[in-house]
Image (tube, grey):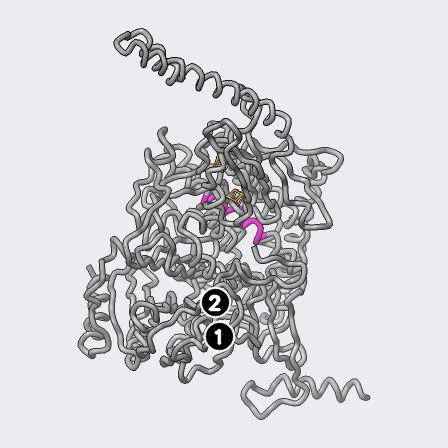
């Protein structure tokens, strides 16, 4: 008899305990019902991108030149683990340094690791802030990073060429001066200054 | 320290039974992360594994190295560890010597090498009867390196497709990047 | 009448033991690879007798991306982004583990501050992984509400980590010798606030789930991985600790600066799904403790060595480096032949061994239990397939 009673009590305890556990859960759900929703209604309200947000790479536009400073050294191409950077470059007429003439990044392959940004000797790479790229074709993710620089680049090259020409002329003048007056220290100093420019 | 005593007991048993020998080229824990670097002949691996199993070690990893280019062998690497303060035993099991290795001239291609990889399949005894954990590790090695394990209960491919006719981690297999990804895909 | 006859047949079949003469009316069922309750592309070929499982053959490889092969054609640095893709739920831990392994090979000193940041980020990542598991596991066995709460909390972690690493899941935050970005005081404040917030939330989780009678009914005594099975299959992580073995790589073989922190290794004795649940929730608390200590102790200083190594050739040799990931012991075995490119990198992933134990656990359970069991061991398929 006692055994059946105990069994019955146990059964009751289990049922009531179970019921209580369910109620406890529901109470929490109820309490949360009155909290502020945390859902962001994405297309309507856009969350701010974080400060270090990583996306496809882009070229930095430098203040003083108004253009990028990719010298086509190919270091980023070599380090890229996804092999998604393609750069071509050559020496523009009248300049000593190479400049990039083609710069394509395949964002579909990029793993946003940042290794290219680490190795770039001129610090001309950065992450862009695009995040909602959609396309039907993979080719759409191949970005030509130089498009926005085409005009600025022409102007920059023109200026650089003039500067280089001026420099060259000054150098030649200095050399000529040195040839004429080998002992004159003033001319030598002047040419040095110019060279250091 | 009781821990150390226990380890040396395992090692002593193994050394006394001549199942393993110390690897002279071992560089020590600080450099390799292995507390004991041992060599084990292929015939003895199952007996050695039994000793570890009885001493309460678990099988941490089994893998394979394709050393055909340099040492003309395939080498299995077993590591056993304790479920306590780390005590890692690394066993090298060298498989039979193979013919000199000739890298396929066409390493760029993802297709099966023009000639069969030299002297495959290689064979080693399976320890999956001692450590069921070895079952999948051995299947993976068979899959990736083509090494056969005798007395393995279920030696079939694990990661690669069942109908694959290649062993992807062999040195002469080619590069992942060169793989043709089929229609619409591009090898990078 | 036919109903009764059938019922009789079923009960008779249920009494026959596995290993008897071939049973009538047994059949195979493919569960997965695209089953909503299988995490990722796992396929279980179940050999069934009615609802009862006689045998199971897990089929993997659907997410094989050849990470180990890729390592053989890239230099050490270029393999970095691969690491966080192996287990995308604890990518930070994997990424930093690889950095630490290579640092050990090259004997690079890591600045103190970077070490502390690594610990904070790894533990945050561990919590986010456990929270995701908590949510999806309960979703699997029918509880939708906890999933939403867990994801809300997890979102806080992702935001904290996103702010400093720039990614939400597949972090590439580590570099050999340090990290890419330093953290600021806002990060530390956010982390402190998060610790406080989650501490307040955990009792809610317990009230909502741990005591719940339905949840207990689904998990108690289900899918027992005992010590014997765990040892035989090399099961590690929470699954092992739920069987009563207090094995944690952070204690057994301390790496980084984990020997400086106080934390317990939660264990349970029963080894069932409920025990694994309890261990993971307790681990969240321990991770919070570690984070709290690390945030309090973090020193100022650089986060990269003065001269980071860009091109290097490690001496020929081998290295095994183990860390505790959210799922168990993650080991990296690197073999160098003295060149710039690794000769071989083998990734010993915990889920691989944990899932391999399934053929020893699943037989004699039911299909409904399979969901609870596979969910409770917390497998990440891409980590198994690599
Ligand atoms: S971020 Fe990484 S993957 Fe992307 S372009 Fe740079 S190096 Fe390549
Ligand atoms: S590393 Fe910098 S400068 Fe060199 S090619 Fe790349 S972007 Fe241009």
Residue at mark 2 shares a chain with residue at mark 1: yes
The reply to whether callout 2 and callout 1 are in contact (CB within 8 Å) is yes
Q: Quadrant of the N terminus of chain C?
A: bottom right
Q: In the rendered structure, does residue C128 fall within the stretch colored magenta?
A: yes
Q: Measured along the vertical axis of the image, is residue B24 above or below residue A86? A: below
* Disc 2: which residue: B106
Main secondary structure of the magenta stretch: helix
* Disc 1: which residue: B114
Please state which of residues A192 and B130 is positioned toward the viewer in this rendering: A192
Question: In the rendered structure, which segment of residues is drawn in magenta?
Answer: C122-134
Query: Where in the figure is residue B33, as x and y percent of width and height?
Result: 29, 57
Please state which of residues A163 and C181 is positioned toward the viewer in this rendering: A163
Q: Earlier in the sequence, mark 2 or mark 1?
A: 2
Query: Where in the figure is residue A54, as x and y percent of width and height?
Result: 56, 38
Q: Residue at x 58, y 44 (%)?
A: C154
Q: Residue at x 28, y 76 (%)?
A: B48
Which picture quadrant has residue C163?
top right
Q: Chain of mark 1?
A: B
Which picture quadrant has residue B147?
bottom left
Q: Residues within 10 Å of mark 1 (few under 14, many from 20)?
A: few
Q: In the rendered structure, does residue C167 fall within the stretch colored magenta?
A: no
Q: Residue at x 49, y 20 (%)?
A: A165
Q: Is mark 2 within 8 Å of ligand 1?
A: no
């Amino acid at each position: 008899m006692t055994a059946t009673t105990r069994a019955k009590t146990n059964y009751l305890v289990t049922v009531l305990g179970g019921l209580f556990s369910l109620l406890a859960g529901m109470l929490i759900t109820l309490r949360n019902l009155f909290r502020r929703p945390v859902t962001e209604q994405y297309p309507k309200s856009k969350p701010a991108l974080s400060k270090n947000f990583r996306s496809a790479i882009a070229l930095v536009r430098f203040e003083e030149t108004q253009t990028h400073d990719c010298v086509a050294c190919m270091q980023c191409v070599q380090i890229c683990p996804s092999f998604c950077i393609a750069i071509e470059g050559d020496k523009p007429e009248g300049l000593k340094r190479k400049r990039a003439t083609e710069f394509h990044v395949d964002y579909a392959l990029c793993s946003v690791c940042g290794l290219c940004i680490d190795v770039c000797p001129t610090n001309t790479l950065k992450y862009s802030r695009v995040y909602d790229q959609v396309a039907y074709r993979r080719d759409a993710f191949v970005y030509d990073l130089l498009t926005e620089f085409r005009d600025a680049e022409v102007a920059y090259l023109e200026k650089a060429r003039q500067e280089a020409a001026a420099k060259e002329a000054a150098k030649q003048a200095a050399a000529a001066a040195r040839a004429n007056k080998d002992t004159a220290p003033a001319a030598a100093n002047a040419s040095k200054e110019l060279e250091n420019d | 320290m009781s821990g150390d005593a226990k380890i040396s007991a395992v090692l002593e048993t193994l050394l006394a039974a001549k199942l393993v020998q110390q690897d002279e080229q071992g560089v020590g824990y600080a450099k390799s992360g292995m507390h004991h670097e041992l060599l084990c002949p292929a015939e003895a691996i199952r007996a050695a594994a039994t000793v570890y199993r009885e001493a309460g070690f678990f099988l941490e990893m089994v893998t394979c190295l394709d050393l055909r280019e340099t040492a003309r062998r395939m080498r299995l690497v077993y590591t056993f560890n304790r479920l306590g303060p780390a005590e890692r035993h690394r066993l090298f099991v060298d498989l039979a010597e193979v013919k000199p290795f000739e890298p396929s001239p066409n390493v760029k291609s993802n297709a099966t090498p023009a000639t069969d990889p030299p002297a495959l399949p290689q064979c080693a005894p399976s320890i999956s009867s001692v450590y069921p954990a070895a079952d999948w590790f051995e299947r993976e090695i068979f899959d990736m390196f083509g090494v056969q394990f005798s007395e393995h209960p279920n030696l079939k491919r694990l990661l690669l497709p069942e109908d694959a006719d290649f062993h992807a981690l062999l040195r002469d297999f080619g590069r992942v990047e060169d793989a043709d990804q089929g229609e619409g895909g591009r090898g990078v | 009448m036919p109903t009764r006859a059938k019922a009789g047949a079923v009960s008779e079949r249920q009494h026959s033991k596995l290993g008897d003469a071939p049973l009538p009316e047994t059949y195979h069922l493919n569960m997965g690879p695209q089953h909503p309750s299988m995490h990722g592309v796992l396929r279980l070929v179940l050999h069934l007798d009615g609802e009862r499982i006689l045998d199971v053959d897990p089929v993997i490889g659907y997410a094989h991306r050849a990470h180990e092969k890729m390592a053989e054609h890239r230099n050490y640095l270029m393999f970095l982004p691969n690491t966080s893709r192996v287990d995308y739920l604890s990518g930070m831990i994997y990424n930093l583990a690889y950095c630490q392994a290579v640092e050990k090979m090259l004997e690079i000193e890591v600045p103190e501050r970077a070490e502390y940041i690594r610990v904070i980020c790894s533990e945050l990542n561990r919590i986010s992984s456990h929270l995701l598991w908590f949510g999806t596991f309960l979703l699997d066995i029918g509880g939708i509400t906890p999933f939403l709460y867990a994801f809300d909390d997890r979102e806080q972690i992702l935001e904290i980590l996103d702010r400093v690493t720039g990614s939400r899941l597949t972090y590439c935050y580590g570099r050999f010798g340090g990290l890419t970005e330093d953290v600021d005081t806002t990060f530390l404040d956010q982390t402190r606030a998060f610790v406080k917030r989650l501490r307040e939330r955990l009792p809610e989780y317990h009230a909502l789930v741990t005591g719940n009678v339905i949840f207990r009914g689904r998990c108690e005594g289900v899918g027992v991985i005992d010590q014997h099975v765990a040892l035989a299959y090399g099961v590690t992580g929470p699954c092992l600790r739920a069987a009563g073995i207090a094995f944690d790589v952070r204690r057994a073989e301390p790496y980084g600066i984990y020997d400086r922190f106080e934390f317990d290794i939660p264990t349970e004795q029963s080894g069932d799904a409920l025990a694994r649940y309890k261990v993971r929730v307790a681990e969240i608390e321990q991770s919070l403790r570690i984070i709290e200590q690390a945030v309090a102790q973090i020193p100022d200083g650089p986060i990269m060595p003065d001269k980071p190594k860009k091109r290097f050739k490690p001496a020929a040799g081998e290295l095994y480096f183990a860390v505790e990931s959210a799922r168990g012991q993650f080991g990296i075995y690197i073999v160098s032949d003295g060149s710039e490119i690794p000769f071989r990198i083998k990734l010993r992933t915990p889920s691989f061994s944990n899932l391999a134990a399934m053929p020893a656990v699943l037989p004699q359970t039911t299909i409904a239990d399979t969901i609870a069991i596979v969910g409770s061991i917390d497998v990440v398929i891409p980590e198994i397939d690599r």
